[in-house]
Amino acid sequence: MRIYQTDGYRDMSRKTANIISAQIILKPDCVLGLATGSTPVGTYDQLVEWYQKGDLDFSEVRTVNLDEYKGLDHENDQSYYYFMHRHLFDRVNIRPENIHIPNGKAENDAEECEAYDRLIRQLGGIDLQLLGLGHNGHIGFNEPSDTFARTTHLVDLQLSTIEANKRFFSSIDLVPRQAYTMGIGTILQAKKILIAVSGKDKAEIVRRAFFGPVTASVPASILQLHPDVTLVADEDALSLSGDSIG
Ligand code: GLP
């Protein structure tokens, strides 16, 4: 695992955007796996800025998002569909047909999940997967568990995740209880993985996930076994991992 320690959130966002931008320049029709949450917002802003300057072209880029809340439609401003359009897709020249996000309103859960994995295979797999890190070590919406889920599936969100995400909703009762997420197996099949983390509140989970044992009770810990992972984290997020990174 390569680790870049950055000087705060802005620097983390710039570094993360730099790596994504390099991927797009090297392979203009690459498949990007994308993430939501507050962490990648600055990354997306930076990519948009470079696009506006004429330094980046999204016209051939294809994207697959990690996850989506079950039950929220595209117009719902808390859906990940809405989030991605607001922070990135509506601001760059990506083609709508090249954007893929699990359908929160799918009628058949199993079919939706199977179709999503099939789609990723048909696209030729993910070249670069961007990830954030949940406070309980989740990636996408793969919550701590006894086993690592392989494929895209429907999950029951843990109370701690519902609590963490309630800040985006007007009331906790409106936070969906379930979500579709790529499985750990789906994520691990990405050729490269880029994980961005910022803030003191993530320091403990960063230490456990990347410098502790690999365990399904900390889903992100499995990334230690992937051959091409880059962690971009600010000094606060790495503040409890000092001895491990030297
Ligand atoms: C959500 C998303 C994850 C994200 C996590 C952390 O649960 N499903 O993909 O990584 O939140 O979010 P944040 O970056 O806001 O801390």
Image: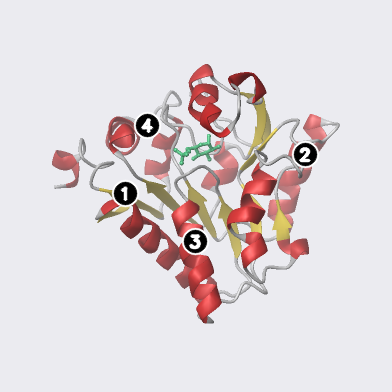
* Mark 4 CB within 8 Å of ligand 1: no
Q: Which residue is mark 1?
A: 233
**Quick one: label 4, few (<14), some, or many (20+) residues within 10 Å?**
some
Q: Is residue 88 above or below residue 231?
A: below
**Marks 3 and 1, Cα distance to the nearest angstrom?**
18 Å
Residue 180 is at least partly visible in this image:
yes
Closest to the observer, 115 or 37: 37
CB within 8 Å, label 3 to label 4: no
Percent of width and height locating residue 226 = 43, 47
Of the image marks 1 and 4, the number of the one nearer the N terminus: 4
Percent of width and height locating residue 156 = 63, 21
Query: Label 2 amino acid?
Result: Asp
Query: Label 1 amino acid?
Result: Ala
Q: Describe residue 160's horizontal placement relative to residue 99 as left or right.
A: left
Q: Secondary structure at mark 4?
A: loop
**Marks 4 and 2, Cα distance to the nearest angstrom?**
36 Å
**Marks 1 and 4, Cα distance to the nearest angstrom?**
20 Å
**Quick one: label 3, few (<14), some, or many (20+) residues within 10 Å?**
some
**Marks 1 and 2, Cα distance to the nearest angstrom?**
32 Å
**Marks 2 and 3, Cα distance to the nearest angstrom?**
24 Å
**Front disc: 3 or 4:** 3
Q: Secondary structure at mark 2?
A: loop
Q: Which residue is mark 2?
A: 73
Of the image marks 1 and 2, the number of the one nearer the N terminus: 2
Q: Which residue is mark 3?
A: 45
**Front disc: 4 or 2:** 2
Percent of width and height locating residue 146 = 50, 19
* Mark 3 CB within 8 Å of ligand 1: no
Of the image marks 3 and 4, the number of the one nearer the N terminus: 3
Residue at the image point whose x is 43% and y is 36% from the top? 220
Q: Which residue is mark 4?
A: 214
**Marks 3 and 4, Cα distance to the nearest angstrom?**
33 Å
